[in-house]
Image (cartoon, rainbow, N blue to C red):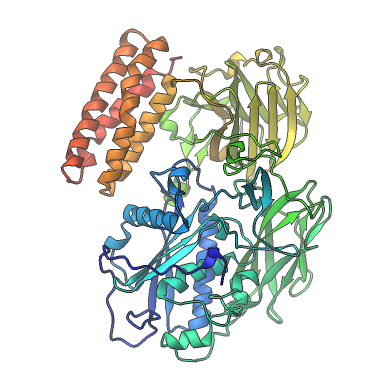
Amino acid sequence: MLPPTIRFLCLTVCSCVLLWSPSSVAGTRTWDGKYDTSQIDLTVAYFVPSDRTPLHDWRDRVDYFCKRIEQFHAREFQGQSTLTTHVHATPVVSTKTTAALRPGDANAIWRRTLSETDRVIGFQQKEHKGFPILLVLSDINWRPLDDFYRLQPKDGKLVFEGINNRGIHHPGAQSGGARAAYFSRQGFGWGLVSADGWRVPYRGSDCVIYHEGCGHTVGLPHPEPQNGSVMSLAQYRGWLSESWLDKEQKVRMAWEPGEAPDDLQMQLFTKFTAIQEPAVPRPGTPVRLKLTWPEACQVESVRVRFQTSVHGPWQDSIQEEPGELAPGSVPLGSFERETPVGYRVDAKLKTGETAEIWGYFQVRTDQSRPLIPHEPSRDLQRSAGVASVVIPVVYREVNLLAEPAECWSKGQWTVDRDLQAAGRMALVSPKSYGARLEIPYAPPEEYRVTVVAEPIDEPHALTLGLSSAGNRFMCLFGFWRDNKFRSAIENIDGQNVGNESTIEGSLFKRGRISQISVTVRKTGVQMMVDGNQIVNWQGRPEQLTLGDYWNTPDSSSIFVGAYHSRFRIYRVTVDELSKRKPGQSLTELVRAISYARNALRDALATGDTETAHSIIEKATPGLSSLTEAAMAAGLRGAKLKSVEDAVNDLTTLFTAVEDETHGGASATWNSVSARVNTAVLALFRSTKTGE
């Protein structure tokens, strides 16, 4: 019996429409022989619960796996079956929270996830050129699990869960919940790979992708007896390129034995690997990646990157020029502390062929105990029953990356349109002195802000404007002056750079993405860059102040800024580490209404009236509280009337859309969008000088 992660789920669903018809044309077939699989159309979607934040590099990860499974399929079927992947352009953000998705067994979360994704992207309504399969890569697991540290809360402790074969990590946590089904009657497949099977690049994760996404979804069973093929135990033995599809299974699918592709590109896919040495490095130990190549190939370049957090940046390692036809190893670097490490290697031959391989290992001192994260994920909370280690509870994670048009700013902040067209969001700061963007969000008493940013110019400084117990202050990262880089908290006891928190040293590099984190507690402020603590100040909130130069209109909001250098900002999130007091601030309510506006627009654009109704239902209580919050914030006269008018407009429009939704018609966003946008902008204008 295989572990639950790859156990085949055989279901029959009678309410689905027919997407693909049996064909009399010769070619490979589904396992039962009903459908032609000479062409397979695989739609891949990234699914994120409403209370989670998408990975900033999700598209890189998804594209990597798609390319791997396409190459594997081409090698195994020699052109008799062609697999084409189509990645949904943006993450599918669920209307449900993690807690709402997880009740029941692993089949239940499979059903909820696939049903919602299918409906949101219109999978069953689309025409497909080949046999249609929907593969969903989920941001969560069936049960709580930190898949980067491989930890599960159990009986008041954090325990390791996963497959670790003498330092080589493979996917296979029971908390995962990967599932797939072939719908023989309707003619399509559904597959789900949970976070444990793809978010972290274990050796064999690509096997899980193919196993669930391309194997079970066309009816392939597990072979008996078990072996190292992709439909059996491949994920526990190596990468997909090191595996195979059983000849007997392919023959059953009407495949005819032929010559396997033997061009250099396919040889590179089959032979290229990169494995860390030593297998389990200790802190401070230099790590190299041992490379294997096809015979006699000439290597033009090798690029190696690594990350020490699944939400963190990818950093380039120190590279050596290839001194031989195919280098036997390349340096990855050394790590000062215990940490998981994800890595990726890009290789290019002088004849133009390319290859990419991703991997993972853990830097450990003691093999008998698990690694404990410095900043635990949402799944490792005290509320989950963990008592033996200090784990801060994250009450809520908030995504603050916003359209600059909706925020007060100093300087011309823009959206990176190229990334936006590719389904990613990034802000670009202007190259000006004191540039900053106010984000209308009032943090709770204790919280952690995380920013993922990349200097476009030679970096001069990145700033974060925050508050502690109502006292505003700023964290300054990498400020260049007098031929030195300095970082500090401004101000402490009225002193700016040069106070007790000041440290010296370069933090950023042009073109390199970094992760910046600030944790605000009642007892102090901690600043970190790329997993390294640079400041840990202990003191009272009333010691903190913000200089007039950096002020923004709303003293309760946070801001992100830059000083005479452009930064591309990929992610701004807040983990709320303390419960909020009852009620919401005016800025929060306005922000919630803005989010509701955007979500409503997207739902109606796809004809998703069920989601539109849910959005309106959730937003309506906030509308009724806006006027009261505006008065409590001190708005009077024309500003207060502007808020009241906007509330009235939005209430009327939401009601009109809701009535149409109840009638079963597809609500027409174009007829109401202009007034909704005007009303939301009026709210933002009215609250610029609020609280």
Q: Looking at the picture, does residue 259 appear above or below residue 213?
A: below
Q: Is residue 563 visible?
A: no
Q: Quadrant of residue 169?
A: bottom right
- Between 116 and 402, the residue placed more toward the observer is 116
What's the residue at 70%, 29% (across, down)?
A: 526
Q: Is residue 645 left or right of residue 244?
A: left
Taking the image as drawn, is residue 273 in sight? yes
Residue at horizontal 29 percent and vertical 27 percent from the top: 678
Residue shown at 62% from the left, 20% from the top: 473
Vertical order, 524 against 113 (above or below): above
Residue 438 locus on image (x, y percent): 50, 25
List x then y, in percent, for residue 55: 53, 48
Looking at this view, name the residue that lies furthest to the top. Answer: 637
Q: Is residue 639 above or below residue 411?
A: above
Q: Position of residue 125 (x, y in %)?
A: 27, 61
The residue sitting at 40% across, 25% down in the picture is: 589
Tell me where residue 122 sits by quadrant: bottom left
Q: Is residue 155 above or below residue 631?
A: below
Image x and y of residue 425, in percent: 47, 44
Look at the image and tell me in which quarter the N terminus lies: bottom right
Given residues 618 and 15, the one toward you in this image is 15
